[in-house]
């Protein structure tokens, strides 16, 4: 199942969208996918032609309020796909950020995605199953300072996932609500100590009495600017998870991220996470215990050429229901891209992505390679 971080992270406004409030982007590309449905056997390969127009609005509507809106339509045409060959996907976003004062602000973001050609495919599904889905997510963040050294942050996230396929929907359609509050204390200008509490509820549309769950997290950590170009963020604590009609457990929880900006617009970032996540087979398993190691690099080869690469390695344990053995599974995601930016408006990119899952259940194995070339123009 596609995984999400504990909290969404929003990138700055892209350079191409800066300088004027309303922008239009036209993107076109050609890619090749060796396993369009993510099947363990009988993989179907296909070339895919893509056209993706986008409209975006970014502006300060008052001295204290920033508004961002965007919509993108993606049309994918497959030359070798059973059933529909032309798929339409939709992405929409609305964001409002408001500063009540220099120390108090709120940030609200609503995102909607209707994906007919998902990048992340579910393991262990019937051969060539349609994994199209809609995801609606709301994120809110409130930050304030009581003194120069003491601050408070409250966050909320609500995510609803619904699958187009009726069989998948009966098993996987669900709502996740997450709320958290944290306090921080500036030990030094470069070091903050943080204490945090989070609560999560997961509600399934069907058979929730056997699949619903809730978690409480209690953790402490630090935000440390080790040097001007090196930062470290860490959290460690416990997660207490209560499952409907299944056993509960209390286990360690950890987040660790480091970033080194070694040159202008060039950086390396990496980290580790230990947590529970929802899986793709809730008939046999309650949830998935994930160890996630990740690293990514962006490097400007020249003023106009940017290279990037990432590796995500996830050894996991699918926790079996009563009478069902747990299952070990390792997943690796790797990707690399080379982008040419001749002007602020033009971007041309070549990319390759490789996904590999080795599971204790051969029906959940996955191998998938995607290569692509695309160009976009913003005006």
Image (tube, grey):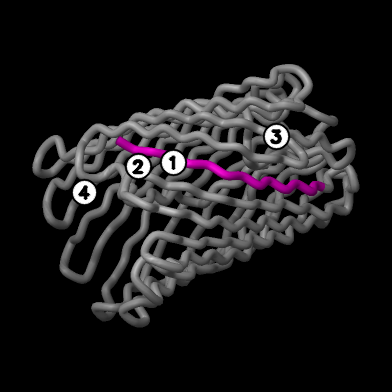
**Badges 3 and 2: C-beta atoms under 8 Å apart?**
no
Q: Is residue 117 visible?
A: yes
Residue 181 percent location from the top left of the image: 37, 53
Which residues make up the magenta segment? 366-379
- Residue drawn at (48%, 41%) of the image: 375
Q: Which comes sooner in the sequence, label 3 or label 2?
A: 3
| CA distance for labels 1 and 2 | 7 Å
**Badge 2 density bin: few <14, some 14–19, many ≥20, Cα 10 Å:** many
Determine which residue is flagged by label 1. Answer: 157
- Residue drawn at (64%, 27%) of the image: 132
- For label 3, the SS is strand
Determine which residue is flagged by label 4. Answer: 105
Left or right of residue 192: residue 336: right
| CA distance for labels 4 and 3 | 46 Å
Q: Nearer the viewer, residue 186 or 305?
A: 305
**Magenta segment includes 262:** no
- Residue drawn at (57%, 44%) of the image: 373
- For label 4, the SS is strand
Q: Main secondary structure of the magenta part?
A: strand
| CA distance for labels 3 and 2 | 39 Å
Q: Nearer the viewer, residue 336 or 144?
A: 336
Residue 321 percent location from the top left of the image: 81, 44
**Badge 4 density bin: few <14, some 14–19, many ≥20, Cα 10 Å:** some
**Badges 4 and 1: C-beta atoms under 8 Å apart?**
no
Q: Which comes sooner in the sequence, label 4 or label 2?
A: 4
**Badges 1 and 2: C-beta atoms under 8 Å apart?**
yes
Determine which residue is flagged by label 3. Answer: 47
Residue 268 percent location from the top left of the image: 48, 70
């Amino acid at each position: 199942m596609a995984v999400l971080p504990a909290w969404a992270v929003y990138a700055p406004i892209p350079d191409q969208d800066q300088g004027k409030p309303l922008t239009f982007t036209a993107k076109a590309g050609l890619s090749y996918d060796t396993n369009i449905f993510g099947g363990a056997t009988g993989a179907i390969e296909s070339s895919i032609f893509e056209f993706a127009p986008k409209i975006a609005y970014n502006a300060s509507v008052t001295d204290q309020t920033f508004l961002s809106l965007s919509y993108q339509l993606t049309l994918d045409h497959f030359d070798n796909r059973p059933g529909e060959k032309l798929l339409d996907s939709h992405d929409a976003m609305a964001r409002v950020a408001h500063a009540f004062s220099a120390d108090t602000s709120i940030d609200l973001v609503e995102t909607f995605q209707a994906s007919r050609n998902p990048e992340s495919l579910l393991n262990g599904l019937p051969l060539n199953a349609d994994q199209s889905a809609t995801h609606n997510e709301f994120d809110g963040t409130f930050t304030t300072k009581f003194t120069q050294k003491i601050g408070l942050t409250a966050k909320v996230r609500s995510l609803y996932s619904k699958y187009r396929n009726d069989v998948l929907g009966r098993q996987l359609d669900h709502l996740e609500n997450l709320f958290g509050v944290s306090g921080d204390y500036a030990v030094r200008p470069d070091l903050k100590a943080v204490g945090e509490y989070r609560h999560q509820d997961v509600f399934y549309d069907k058979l929730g009495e056997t699949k619903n769950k809730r978690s409480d997290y209690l953790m402490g950590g630090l935000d440390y600017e080790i040097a001007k170009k090196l930062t470290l963020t860490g959290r460690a604590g416990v997660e207490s998870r209560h499952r409907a009609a299944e056993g509960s457990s209390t286990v360690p929880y950890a987040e660790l991220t480091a970033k080194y900006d070694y040159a202008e617009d060039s950086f390396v970032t990496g980290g580790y996470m230990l947590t529970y996540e929802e899986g793709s087979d809730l008939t046999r398993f309650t949830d998935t215990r994930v160890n996630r190691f990740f690293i990514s690099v962006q490097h400007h080869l020249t003023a106009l050429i940017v290279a990037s690469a990432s590796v995500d390695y996830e050894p996991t344990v699918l926790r079996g229901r009563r009478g069902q053995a747990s299952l070990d599974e390792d997943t690796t995601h790797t990707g690399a891209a080379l982008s040419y930016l001749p002007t602020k408006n033009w971007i041309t990119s070549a990319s390759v992505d490789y996904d590999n899952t080795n599971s204790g259940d051969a029906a959940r194995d996955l191998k998938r390679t995607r290569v692509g070339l695309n160009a976009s123009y913003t005006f």
